[in-house]
Image (cartoon, rainbow, N blue to C red):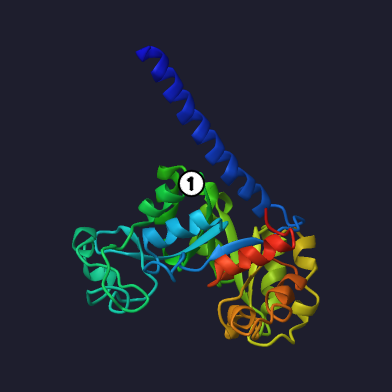
Amino acid sequence: MKHLFKQIFSGTLLLVGFNANAQVDKLIKQLHNPNDKNVLVAAHRGDWRNAPENSLQAYKLAIDMGVDIIEVDLNRTSDGVLIIMHDETIDRTTNGKGKPSDYTLEQLKKFHLRNGLGVVSNHSIPTLEEVMLLAKGKILINLDKSYPYYNEAYRVLKKTGTLQQAIFKTDAPYIDVRAKYPTILDSITFMPVVYLDKPTAKQIITEYQKEIKPVAFELIFAKDTSGIISNNAFIPQHGSKIWINSLWASLNAGHDDDLAVEREDIKNSWEWLINQHARIIQTDRPKQLLEYLKRLSLHP
């Protein structure tokens, strides 16, 4: 009987592992398919409305909510450990002061994150490794502020077996990225960030398309008069998705989350973004965006 119980328990663990891997494999396949009509939802800093931003709890809540991607902001301690921290200092988001590089990981873990009201919580600053282990087999990761740390992040991802789940990004032009990371660029899932209001935007996109095939282009624009916005079908035609942020107006010419939720004008916010071929939307309102996409059968 004891042997039978062990067999059943082992089989259950294998089934859970298989289901988890199947889930993330589906997301990876969708990410790499520029013709998939469904929209991937990225939660900015996790579910920060219900837990401290960039905390493990914020990421867990986002995963449980059913989002496809969580965003993490990379920084580094004095002993070289990659941690998750948006700001250059820990002043705003914790009960500590100074830069992450002023502290070892052990010292940094003694501070606690503040919630959205500024109240100190029981949550500590997570490491990239902790986040990747939480996300393993479940969800994709947007590695924001990662450009200085590609090599270190790559090692963490290889160690945790999560390399295919992570999206590396930067607004640097191709020639600079290739010079800085000549080998690693061909081994990672990569997304350039392009500011469409700049006159060099089309040139940057074209060069990346010529040299490599990025998984997506993150398009940022304060005005919606760019010719690339009105005629951007060439991006998915060349094998890349379009990522647009709906966070705040300066990133999307006013077609933002608050317009959708607070003013109930979805037509000129999320619908507009989707009509511009956005197949990945990073949002501060993941719950409402998921509900909207499901009504349109644009999210499983």
Q: Nearer the viewer, residue 101 or 23?
A: 23
The residue at the point 71 percent across, 62 percent down is 295
Residue where numbered disc 1 is placed: 162
For the residue carrying disc 1, how many other residues have a C-alpha within 10 Å: few (<14), some (14-19), or many (20+)?
many
Give the structural element (helix, strand or loop) at label 1. loop
Which sits in the foreground, 202 or 215?
215
Compare residues 300 and 192 and report the one nearer the observer.
Answer: 300
Q: Looking at the picture, does residue 73 appear above or below residue 249?
A: above
Q: Position of residue 164 (x, y in %)?
A: 55, 48
Q: Quadrant of residue 287?
A: bottom right
Query: Residue 182, can we see it?
Result: no
Q: For the residue marked with disc 1, what is the amino acid? A: Thr
The number of discs equals: 1
Residue 156, image x, y percentages = 40, 50
Question: In the rendered view, does 212 fall on the left or right side of 83?
Answer: right
**Residue 195, can we see it?**
yes
User: Residue at point 64% right, 79% down?
Assistant: 260
Residue 177: quadrant of the picture: bottom right
For the N terminus, the image quarter is top left
Q: Position of residue 68 (x, y in %)?
A: 57, 56
Above or below residue 126? Residue 117 is: below
The residue positioned farthest toward the front in the image shown:
1
Q: Foreground: 272 or 236?
A: 272
Compared across the picture, whether 186 is left or right of 76 comes to right
Placement of 253 over or under 98, stated as above or below: below
Looking at the image, residue 233 sits to the left or right of residue 13; the answer is right
Q: Give percent across and percent down for residue 81.
A: 30, 57
Left or right of 291, for residue 150: left
